[in-house]
């Protein structure tokens, strides 16, 4: 297995560099590495590594959500509460419903299977959005109106909402969902409990760091470990109570930034280095699970389905940021930044296939197809629009 990890890292770094040189997101190159090295093409990755792929995906998600939390300021969140709330569920709902209604015609799925597909694809990607928003935040672009914080916070809540709905629909397919109304109540309950538990853990960590003065590397190890345990606890109690571990992890970073800003920045710097390795493992392993033939067979129908969902998502995003102090171009920036898909699709794309859902291979293929189509376009569009439409803090707004 060590040899497979070494091969993944070397090829992942090379393709990341190669794709960045041609101004495409490196994660697309990593997906390509996984497809080529996976069992459906060259088959050079040892099977033992796939048994741990879910754990690797979870660890990568922890790192990116911690980085997001460590960049969100409380004052910005409070001042933009309404658009954050609306962006957390309206775009994903629009997209999920559009795909649910379209997939039965394009792929002959039942509506429940189409809903599983819809809410597999619907989530926005922290892996693409967070680095871009962190960059804009560091450059003070759009920070006078809190735009980077708005997107960081709402994207994380979007992920939590989408995953809860995905789990509910998957439970309906398996016959374990229970009362649908109760599952709907689970959404706000899981968000609030996730934030509460994460905030409490963040405060405990702040007190520990204040007392023992650990080095930045050790603090980072502790924060990652506590976050992983939070996700493990959520998985253990999910049959009894709904908790959103994704928001909990983000809340840990949020509290550390509020209570100990200097330490938070040190931890964030360390996490940015950990992410280099985590990102490679995440996207290469996701690519390796894709059967190229299924993606090919999805073809134009798959592309049409994804574009239909994106059109609905874009309408929902624009509705969510209406009646704010954002100008037209800043609202369009929010729409563009909500296009990329990668992290959640990478984490849950294979779950329906593993759960025995009919058409699970198509769901996985379209999830990866969505990453391939939207990650480059969304990443490039976000950087292009942000550099031109977001005003630097202290500067006058462009005409």
Image (cartoon, rainbow, N blue to C red):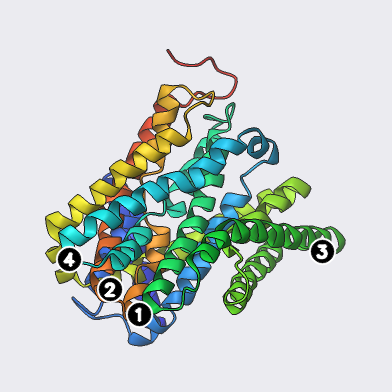
In the image shown, does 288 or 240 lie closer to the viewer? 240
Disc nearer the start of the sequence (2/3) = 3
Q: Quadrant of the C terminus?
A: top left
From the viewer's perspective, is residue 332 above or below residue 208? Answer: above
Query: Depth-wise, is mark 4 or mark 2 nearer the camera?
Result: 4
Label 2, label 3: how far apart the Cα atoms are: 45 Å
User: Disc number at residue 208?
Assistant: 3
Mark 1 → mark 4, Cα distance in angstroms: 20 Å
The image quadrant of residue 379 is: top left
Q: Nearest to the eye among marks 1 and 3: give it.
A: 1
Q: Earlier in the sequence, mark 1 or mark 3?
A: 3
Q: Name the residue carrying label 1.
A: 354
Q: Position of residue 97 (x, y in %)?
A: 34, 52
Q: CA distance from mark 1 to mark 3?
A: 40 Å
> Disc 3 and disc 4: Cα gap in Å?
55 Å
Q: Disc 1 vs disc 2: Cβ atoms closer than 8 Å?
A: yes
Helix, strand or loop at mark 4 = loop
Seen at 35% across and 80% down, the residue is: 354
Q: Quadrant of residue 108?
A: bottom left
Within 10 Å of the Cα at label 4, are there few (<14), some (14-19), or many (20+) other Cα atoms?
few
User: What residue is shown at x 57% (from left), y 77% (from top)?
Assistant: 239
Determine contact: label 1, label 3, CB under 8 Å.
no
Quarter holding the N terminus is bottom left
Looking at the image, the residue that sits furthest to the right is 211
Residue drawn 50% across the image and 25% down it:
326
Label 4 close to label 2 by CB (< 8 Å): no
């Amino acid at each position: 297995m060590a040899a497979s990890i070494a091969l993944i890292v070397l090829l992942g770094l090379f393709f990341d560099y190669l794709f960045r040189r041609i101004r495409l997101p490196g994660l697309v190159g990593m997906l390509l590495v996984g497809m080529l090295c996976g069992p459906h093409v060259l088959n050079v990755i040892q099977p033992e590594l796939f048994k741990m792929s879910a754990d690797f995906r979870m660890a990568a998600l922890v790192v990116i959500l911690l980085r997001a939390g460590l960049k969100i300021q409380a004052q910005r969140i409070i001042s933009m509460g309404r658009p954050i709330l609306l962006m957390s569920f309206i775009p994903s709902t629009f997209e999920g419903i559009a795909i649910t209604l379209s997939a039965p015609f394009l792929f002959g799925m039942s509506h429940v299977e189409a809903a599983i597909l819809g809410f597999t694809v619907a989530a926005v990607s922290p892996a693409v959005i967070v680095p871009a928003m962190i960059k804009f935040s560091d450059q003070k672009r759009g920070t006078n109106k809190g735009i980077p914080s708005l997107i960081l916070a709402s994207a994380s809540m979007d992920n939590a909402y989408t995953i809860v709905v995905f789990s509910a629909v998957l439970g309906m397919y398996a016959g374990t969902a229970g009362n649908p109304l109760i599952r709907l109540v689970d959404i706000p309950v899981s968000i609030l409990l996730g934030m509460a538990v994460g905030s409490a853990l963040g405060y405990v960590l702040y007190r520990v760091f204040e007392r023992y003065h650990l080095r930045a590397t050790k603090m980072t190890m502790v924060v990652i470990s506590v976050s992983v345990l939070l996700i493990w606890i959520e998985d253990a109690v999910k049959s009894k109570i709904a908790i959103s571990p994704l928001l909990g992890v983000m809340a840990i970073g949020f509290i550390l930034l509020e209570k100990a800003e200097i330490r938070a920045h040190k931890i964030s710097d360390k996490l940015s280095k950990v992410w280099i390795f985590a990102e490679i493992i995440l996207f290469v392993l996701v690519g390796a699970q894709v059967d190229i033939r299924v993606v090919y067979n999805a073809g134009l129908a798959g592309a049409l389905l994804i574009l239909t969902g994106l059109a609905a998502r874009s309408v929902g995003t624009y509705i969510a940021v209406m009646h704010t102090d954002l100008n037209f171009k800043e609202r369009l920036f929010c729409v563009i930044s909500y296009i990329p898909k990668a992290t959640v699709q990478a984490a849950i794309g294979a779950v329906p296939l593993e759960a025995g859902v009919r058409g699970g291979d198509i769901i996985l293929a379209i999830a990866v197809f969505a990453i391939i189509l939207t990650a480059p376009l969304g990443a490039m569009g976000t950087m292009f629009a942000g550099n031109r439409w977001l005003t630097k803090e202290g500067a006058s707004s462009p005409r």
